[in-house]
Protein backbone atom coordinates (compact mmCIF):
# COMPACT_ATOMS: atom_id res chain seq x y z
CA UNK A 1 0.00 0.00 0.00
CA UNK A 2 1.31 3.43 -0.90
CA UNK A 3 1.31 5.97 1.92
CA UNK A 4 0.45 9.63 1.71
CA UNK A 5 3.32 10.95 3.85
CA UNK A 6 6.22 12.51 2.02
CA UNK A 7 9.03 14.95 2.44
CA UNK A 8 9.91 16.84 -0.70
CA UNK A 9 10.83 20.32 -1.81
CA UNK A 10 9.20 22.12 -4.73
CA UNK A 11 11.49 24.16 -6.96
CA UNK A 12 10.06 26.43 -9.66
CA UNK A 13 12.00 27.12 -12.85
CA UNK A 14 11.16 30.41 -14.50
CA UNK A 15 10.94 30.52 -18.26
CA UNK A 16 10.50 26.76 -18.68
CA UNK A 17 7.14 25.84 -20.19
CA UNK A 18 5.27 22.67 -19.27
CA UNK A 19 7.83 21.32 -16.81
CA UNK A 20 6.82 23.15 -13.65
CA UNK A 21 6.97 22.36 -10.80
CA UNK A 22 10.18 20.40 -10.39
CA UNK A 23 10.35 18.50 -7.13
CA UNK A 24 13.42 17.20 -5.34
CA UNK A 25 12.95 13.76 -3.80
CA UNK A 26 14.75 12.90 -0.54
CA UNK A 27 17.53 11.17 -2.52
CA UNK A 28 18.09 14.53 -4.33
CA UNK A 29 16.59 13.30 -7.61
CA UNK A 30 14.26 15.85 -9.14
CA UNK A 31 11.19 14.93 -11.15
CA UNK A 32 9.35 16.83 -13.85
CA UNK A 33 6.11 15.76 -15.55
CA UNK A 34 4.97 17.14 -18.89
CA UNK A 35 2.97 18.13 -20.83
CA UNK A 36 0.30 19.47 -18.53
CA UNK A 37 -2.44 19.64 -19.68
CA UNK A 38 -2.04 16.38 -21.59
CA UNK A 39 -4.11 14.34 -24.04
CA UNK A 40 -2.28 11.07 -24.85
CA UNK A 41 0.53 10.45 -22.39
CA UNK A 42 2.59 11.98 -19.61
CA UNK A 43 6.36 12.01 -19.76
CA UNK A 44 8.04 11.61 -16.39
CA UNK A 45 11.60 12.87 -16.28
CA UNK A 46 13.99 12.04 -13.45
CA UNK A 47 17.29 13.89 -13.14
CA UNK A 48 19.08 10.65 -12.26
CA UNK A 49 18.38 7.04 -13.09
CA UNK A 50 15.24 6.06 -11.20
CA UNK A 51 15.79 4.38 -7.85
CA UNK A 52 14.78 0.71 -7.62
CA UNK A 53 11.08 0.17 -6.95
CA UNK A 54 10.03 3.62 -8.19
CA UNK A 55 6.48 3.86 -9.54
CA UNK A 56 4.16 6.56 -10.90
CA UNK A 57 0.56 6.20 -9.77
CA UNK A 58 -2.30 8.28 -11.19
CA UNK A 59 -5.41 8.88 -9.06
CA UNK A 60 -8.80 10.25 -10.09
CA UNK A 61 -10.59 12.86 -7.98
CA UNK A 62 -12.17 10.07 -5.90
CA UNK A 63 -8.72 8.79 -4.92
CA UNK A 64 -9.02 5.65 -7.06
CA UNK A 65 -5.95 4.38 -8.92
CA UNK A 66 -6.56 4.84 -12.66
CA UNK A 67 -3.01 4.29 -13.89
CA UNK A 68 0.27 2.93 -12.65
CA UNK A 69 3.63 2.52 -14.32
CA UNK A 70 7.06 1.53 -13.02
CA UNK A 71 9.74 4.14 -13.58
CA UNK A 72 12.77 2.24 -14.78
CA UNK A 73 14.80 4.96 -16.50
CA UNK A 74 15.41 8.71 -16.45
CA UNK A 75 12.49 9.21 -18.86
CA UNK A 76 9.28 7.17 -18.67
CA UNK A 77 5.78 7.56 -20.08
CA UNK A 78 2.35 6.96 -18.62
CA UNK A 79 -0.44 6.50 -21.20
CA UNK A 80 -3.64 8.44 -20.44
CA UNK A 81 -5.52 8.28 -23.76
CA UNK A 82 -8.27 6.04 -22.33
CA UNK A 83 -8.98 8.34 -19.37
CA UNK A 84 -11.89 10.77 -19.45
CA UNK A 85 -11.23 14.50 -19.49
CA UNK A 86 -10.68 15.84 -15.98
CA UNK A 87 -8.22 16.40 -13.16
CA UNK A 88 -5.96 13.74 -11.72
CA UNK A 89 -3.22 13.52 -9.10
CA UNK A 90 0.10 11.93 -10.13
CA UNK A 91 2.19 10.58 -7.26
CA UNK A 92 5.66 9.10 -7.62
CA UNK A 93 6.66 6.57 -5.00
CA UNK A 94 10.09 5.23 -4.11
CA UNK A 95 9.30 1.96 -2.34
CA UNK A 96 6.12 3.03 -0.54
CA UNK A 97 7.16 6.63 0.23
CA UNK A 98 5.59 9.39 -1.85
CA UNK A 99 8.38 11.63 -3.17
CA UNK A 100 6.46 13.70 -5.75
CA UNK A 101 2.89 14.81 -6.28
CA UNK A 102 1.36 16.96 -9.03
CA UNK A 103 -2.10 17.86 -10.25
CA UNK A 104 -2.57 16.72 -13.88
CA UNK A 105 -5.20 17.98 -16.30
CA UNK A 106 -6.38 15.51 -18.97
CA UNK A 107 -7.86 17.23 -22.03
Image (cartoon, grey):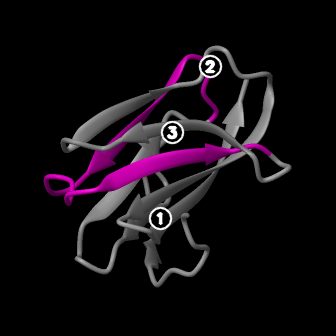
Location of residue 87 by image quarter: top right
**Closer to the camera: disc 2 or disc 3?**
3
Residues at circles 2 and 1 in contact by the CB criterion of under 8 Å: no
Check disc 2: other Cα within 10 Å, few if <14, some if 14-19, many if 20+: some
Can you say whether 105 is above or below 9 in the image? above
Q: Give how far across and how far down residue 78 sits, in percent.
A: 46, 30
Query: Viewed as shown, does residue 67 lie left or right of 19?
Result: right
Residue plotted at (35% across, 66% down): 95
Query: How far apart, in angstroms, are the residues tagged by discs 2 and 1?
Result: 21 Å
Residue at which label 1 appears:
100
Q: Is residue 80 visible?
A: yes
**Which dot marks residue 61?**
none
**Closer to the camera: disc 2 or disc 1?**
1
The segment highlighted magenta reads 37-60
**Closer to the camera: disc 1 or disc 3?**
3
Can you say whether 63 is above or below 66 in the image? below
Query: How far apart, in angstroms, are the residues tagged by discs 2 and 3?
Result: 17 Å
**Which dot marks residue 68?**
3
- Dot 2 or dot 1, earlier in sequence: 2
Amino acid sequence: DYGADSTCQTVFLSGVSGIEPVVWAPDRTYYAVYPNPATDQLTIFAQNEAAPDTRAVLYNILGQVVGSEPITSASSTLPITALPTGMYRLVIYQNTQAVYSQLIIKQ
